[in-house]
């Protein structure tokens, strides 16, 4: 059975529903990546000295490199990409990657959990921030998500959840049901379960639709497709060096997709 077969719909939901990583989502934005946080026992005192501190600093640097490379590789090639490619881009041996992550599934769960948590925070702020109208809230979320690349790292089951939400009319309302025993509006909740993210997106879609700003028939599954859209690597490579953001191939693709979602 291939890695892709193992991941498609077979990653336990509980893996994404627990607080598996120590990450501060607010430290990440469209213009940069988040600072990587580490499990207990891996924190490095900045004032530490000696051989042990040097080893811990090296271990931290390697972990940062592996996580950064994994996001790039999985974002470009999908979660079926080999660990050898992650190691190559990180500049470390594949044995180093496996010492930190005993299987690819563990690394995938780590990356997906962090990305879902960040996207959930962004979706909640868009829904409950109250600073923009329904369409601007949805479009703003999609722009931030596309700029960060996080949408391309959703776990495979997110697509199934999106389709399920679209088939259950009562889940399309603007009021979210309590999720996991907590209010979905609770700003302190940092869930990595993709079902909460999909509920928040469904509410953004429903609100924009009720305001007449969304094309009739658009569902949360359509929004997830926009969220995961990416410019092919060869097309991005053809752009002038340093060109990104507004006017880039990725930005133009997003604007085309947003025009397809918005009511005429």
Image: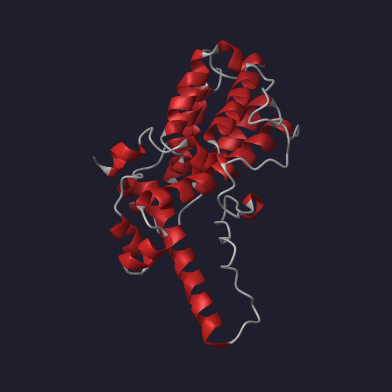
Residue at x-position 46% and y-position 32%? 158
Q: How many marks?
A: 0
On screen, 8 above or below 19? above
Q: Residue furthest right?
A: 130
Along the line of sight, which residue is nearer the eye, 256 or 54?
A: 54
Residue 263 appears anywhere in the view: yes
Residue 150 spot, x, y in % from top left: 50, 45
On screen, 137 above or below 57? above
On screen, 180 above or below 46? above
- In the shown orientation, is residue 57 left or right of residue 229? right
Q: Quadrant of residue 5?
A: top left
Q: Residue furthest left?
A: 1
Residue at x-position 37% and y-position 67%? 96
Task: State the scheme by which the image is colored.
Answer: secondary structure
Along the line of sight, which residue is nearer the eye, 180 or 25?
A: 180
Q: Quadrant of the N terminus?
A: top left
Residue 131 spot, x, y in % from top left: 75, 34
Q: Quadrant of the C terminus?
A: top right
On screen, 261 above or below 122? above
Q: Quadrant of residue 211?
A: top right
Along the line of sight, which residue is nearer the eye, 169 or 12?
A: 12
Residue at x-position 44% and y-position 41%? 152
Residue 128 spot, x, y in % from top left: 73, 32
Residue at x-position 45% and y-position 54%? 243
Along the line of sight, which residue is nearer the eye, 222 or 84?
A: 84
Residue 256 appears anywhere in the view: no
Residue 194 spot, x, y in % from top left: 53, 35
């Amino acid at each position: 059975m291939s890695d892709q077969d193992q991941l498609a719909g077979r990653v336990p939901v509980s893996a994404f529903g627990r607080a598996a990583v120590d990450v501060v989502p607010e430290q990440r934005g469209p213009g940069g990546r988040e600072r990587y946080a580490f499990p207990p026992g891996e924190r490095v005192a900045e004032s530490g000295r000696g051989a042990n501190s040097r080893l811990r600093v090296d271990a931290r640097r390697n972990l940062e490199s592996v996580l950064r490379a994994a996001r790039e590789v999985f974002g470009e090639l999908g979660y079926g990409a080999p660990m050898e490619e992650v190691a190559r881009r990180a500049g470390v041996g594949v044995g180093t990657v496996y010492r930190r992550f005993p299987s690819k599934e563990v690394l995938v769960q780590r990356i997906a959990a962090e990305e879902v948590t960040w996207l959930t925070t962004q979706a909640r702020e868009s829904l409950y921030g109250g600073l923009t109208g329904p369409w601007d809230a949805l479009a703003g979320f999609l722009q931030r998500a596309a700029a960060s690349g996080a949408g391309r790292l959703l776990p495979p089951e997110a697509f199934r959840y999106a389709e399920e939400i679209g088939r259950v009319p009562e889940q399309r309302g603007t009021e979210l049901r309590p999720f996991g025993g907590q209010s979905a509006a609770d700003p302190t909740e940092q869930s990595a379960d993709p079902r909460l993210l999909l509920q928040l997106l469904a509410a953004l879609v429903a609100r924009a639709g009720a305001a007449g700003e969304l094309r009739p028939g658009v569902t949360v599954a359509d929004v997830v497709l926009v969220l995961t859209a990416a410019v092919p690597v060869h097309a991005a490579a053809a752009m002038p060096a340093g060109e990104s953001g507004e006017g880039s191939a990725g930005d133009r693709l997003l604007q085309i997709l947003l025009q397809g979602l918005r009511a005429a």
